[in-house]
Amino acid sequence: MTMQTAILLIKIVASGAPQGLASAARDAEAPRTAASADSLSIVFLANAGVLIEAGARKVLVDALYGEGLNYLRMVTPSVRERLEKALPPFDGAALILATHTHRDHFNAEAVAGYLRASPTTSFISTPEAAEAVSALQPPIAAGRIHASAPADSNYLAGSAPGVTVRVLGLPHGPTSVPARNVGFLIAIGGFTVLHIGDTRVDAALLGRLTAPAVDLAFIPYWYFLDPAGEEAVVRALPGAQIVLMHVPPTESDYVKSRGGWHTLLSGIRTRHPNVTDFGAELERRTVRKSP
Ligand SMILES: [Zn+2]
């Protein structure tokens, strides 16, 4: 993937209605949302799943994935039920985003369950994920399901205040089950938030695609398994607070050989205090802009 990596700009009306999505001009820069907040709230779900909140505005990323994969972290059944029925604290999301169709990030029935229970919510993902949700019965209005592929460069605009999403074509890292992966640059409450799913692209490319500024980045932990990767990512995202995602419940031999995840993370945090990981399910963090 090169710099032709496509960017899809989508702006969503946070107050809700899917009619806020309408095609407009092409653009390459994500406008800041009109409504700024002093802080963001982020709530960990499991694996790469997170709820992002700015005031009443909510976005769920990689949060609805059904049964998941048994060797990775999964939300507890009660949280899963609340997610799939759009019940508090997960209700009223303006958007559900899914980076790719792997079973630890996405499940069509789970996404459809939320969309049916929450008529003002829209879904953005890859064409494969969008198609899987669209194929389910009873059908969900096509205007609420948005497919984005690296070749896309449409700009869908609504009126501010709201949530603006740029979709980045970032290929999945090495995998035995190939899938198209996208990243999301989310402008919400005056913050720019990056979630890159399971990509493993060169950190410098990440920096170029996400410039000028990312306030908060959800980055898969594997970038930090070696000092060079760690340095490159931190350098590529200056000023960002970085939350490590996709940390497996069982430590690999490699992680064990480095003293275990806790030791590894504490070394990372000593070198880079702006890097952290999530702990338990439903852990909530308040994120403020870096001074
Ligand atoms: Zn994956």
Image: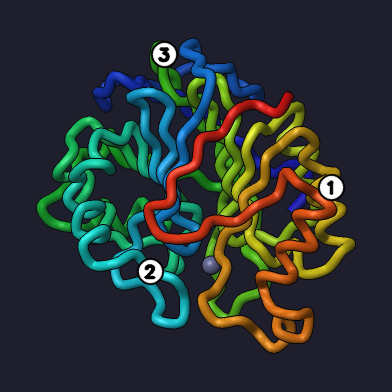
Q: Position of residue 124 (x, y in %)?
A: 41, 42
**51 relative to 27, above or below:** below
Quarter of the image where one finds residue 140: top left
Which numbered mark, 2 or 1, is in the foreground of this view? 2
Query: What amino acid does circle 2 point to?
Result: Met
Residue toward you, 72 or 9? 72
- Tell me if residue 127 can be seen: no
- Label 3 Cα crowd, 10 Å radius (few <14 / some 14-19 / many 20+): some
In the rendered image, the quadrant that contains the N terminus is bottom right
Q: Position of residue 29 (x, y in %)?
A: 65, 22
Tell which circle, 3 or 2, labels the residue nearer the N-terminal end.
2
Mark 1: which secondary structure?
Answer: helix
Quarter of the image where one finds residue 266: bottom right
**203 relative to 24, above or below:** below
Residue toward you, 255 or 98? 255
- Label 2 Cα crowd, 10 Å radius (few <14 / some 14-19 / many 20+): many
Query: What amino acid does circle 1 point to?
Result: Ala
Mark 3: which secondary structure?
Answer: loop
Q: CA distance from mark 3 to mark 1?
A: 32 Å
Quarter of the image where one finds residue 97: top left
Tell which circle, 2 or 1, labels the residue nearer the N-terminal end.
2
Q: Which residue is mark 3?
A: 161
Q: CA distance from mark 2 to mark 1?
A: 31 Å
Judged left or right of residue 33, residue 132 is: left
Q: Are marks 3 and 2 in contact (CB under 8 Å)?
A: no
Tell which circle, 3 or 1, labels the residue nearer the N-terminal end.
3
Q: Which residue is mark 2?
A: 74
Which numbered mark, 3 or 2, is in the foreground of this view? 2
- Tell me if residue 170 can be seen: yes
Name the residue: 70% across, 49% down.
275
- Label 1 Cα crowd, 10 Å radius (few <14 / some 14-19 / many 20+): some
Name the residue: 61% across, 76% down.
175
